[in-house]
Image (cartoon, helix red, strand yellow):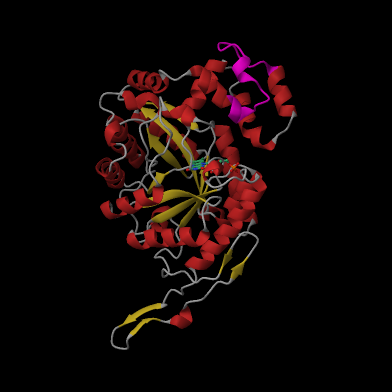
Amino acid sequence: MSIGRPAGQLWRRPDSRVEEAFSLPLLSEIARAAEEAKFDALFRADNTRLDFSRVRVSGPPHYLEPMVVLSALAARTRHIGLIGTASTTFSAPYTLARQFATLDHLSGGRAGWNMVTSTVGEENYGDQPLPSKAERYARAREFADVAIGLWESWEPDALVLDRAAGVFADDEKIHPIGHRGRHFSVRGPLNVHRPPQGRPVLVQAGRSEEGRDFAAEYADIVFAAADDLRGAQAFYADMKDRAGRKGRDPDSLKILLGTHIVLGATEAEALSLEREWTDGVDVGKAVEYLQTVVSPHLRLAELPLDEQVPARLLDAAEALGEEQHQRGLAWLRTHQGSTVRQLALRHRQNSLHLGFTGTPEQAAAELARLFRARAADGFVLSHSHLPEGLELLTSGVVPQLRRAGLFRHDYEGPTLKHHLGLR
Ligand SMILES: Cc1cc2nc3c(=O)[nH]c(=O)nc-3n(C[C@H](O)[C@H](O)[C@H](O)COP(=O)(O)O)c2cc1C
């Protein structure tokens, strides 16, 4: 379950508890509710910029730093996994490997790292432009190799703790990694002994060729973004196939589909919440933002708000064939029947992820359908609002899935790898 602040404009509801959104008591309450419901993990997303265009009305998606949040939550939970985003573009591998090893120790083997290459935030890390995607993923691979080398730099039995013999650690079982590469020089070994899970659970969320290949090789979990069944199925099949071609058991790569759900006790209530979510959004700004995602060559902001995007403009933008806009343009193609206003609001609500609005029964049926249709092994769910959104998720959706035999009754073991069925 993804935890952040209330979605969109829902922070304005009188009982949203938005004042507490950055406080440990509320974050702990959410974490414990998710743990009581037996979710696999909490997920804390992140990027490293304050988006001025959003802060006035809906706030940027994240404020608090994930490693610090998850460390605090490790102390207030006992079973649930703790997955946080950290960037391979804006961090150093020794530092991050140490932090995740520490989180894995403190939580008793519950840490997971969402390895992102970042698409924003370069202005906060020097004067250089954001490296190209190919360059970012090349660095990410080397970063992951170094981090894995560091986690493995202590053999499993290197920590001896033999009081009688006076041996704390067996230094013959602790090895420097001597890494000298294009991006990093790291001698090692790590100054934290081997984490309980061997290494934290590795997560990747790339959509591009580079991202998919990186995920197929390194990740235990892929966070998928698709906004319809067919798109999700195609991504799922492609990732399982890539994992197989890398010589892995495809089942060892778990594909979790990012899904925003708006829950109401009745369908009417859910639909009204959905309207509230986007009420008060500056549509002009939302269109401008969407334009940067789909393609700056497709001048959405100059089109009439209540008309569809003319097919010839879409064709022309696609013909330019720019890699970074393929996904946005494909999304636009699948929603060609919508007006510019509807597109902007839809994108504002779900970005390019799957969105669902309805009752807990309907949500459970939809999630079950996606799972059975091999569109996902699981989901990264965000609850839209507090307190009812979370309550309807944990006490409404989860029991329905449990009755269908699709959700655990209890944790299978102590670590996140146990929850995920990974060795
Ligand atoms: C469920 C989910 C969660 C994500 N979380 C983050 C995040 O916390 N930080 C981030 O920078 N990107 C995040 N992403 C975006 C991906 O890391 C990636 O940049 C994006 O899917 C584009 O793929 P590409 O890098 O291969 O072009 C997330 C994507 C998904 C589907």
Residue under the point 62% across and 33% down: 327
Can residue 293 be spotted in the picture? Answer: yes
Quadrant of image for the N terminus = top left
Give how far across and how far down residue 117 sits, in percent: 56, 47
Residue 90 is situated, as x and y percent measured from the top left of the image, at 53, 50
Q: In this view, does 165 lie above or below 199?
A: below
> Going by the image, does 95 lie left or right of 302?
left
Residue appearing at x 40%, y 22% in the figure: 274
Depth check, front residue: 39 or 15: 15
Return the residue found at the far bottom: 165
- Residue nearest the observer in this picture, 337 or 340: 340
Magenta extent: 291-311
Q: Is 105 rendered above or below residue 89?
A: below
Q: Can the viewer see residue 248?
A: no
Q: Does the magenta stretch include residue 109?
A: no
Image check: 54 left or right of 231?
Answer: left
Residue 106, horizontal then vertical, whole percent:
33, 61
Q: Magenta region, mostly helix, strand or loop?
A: loop
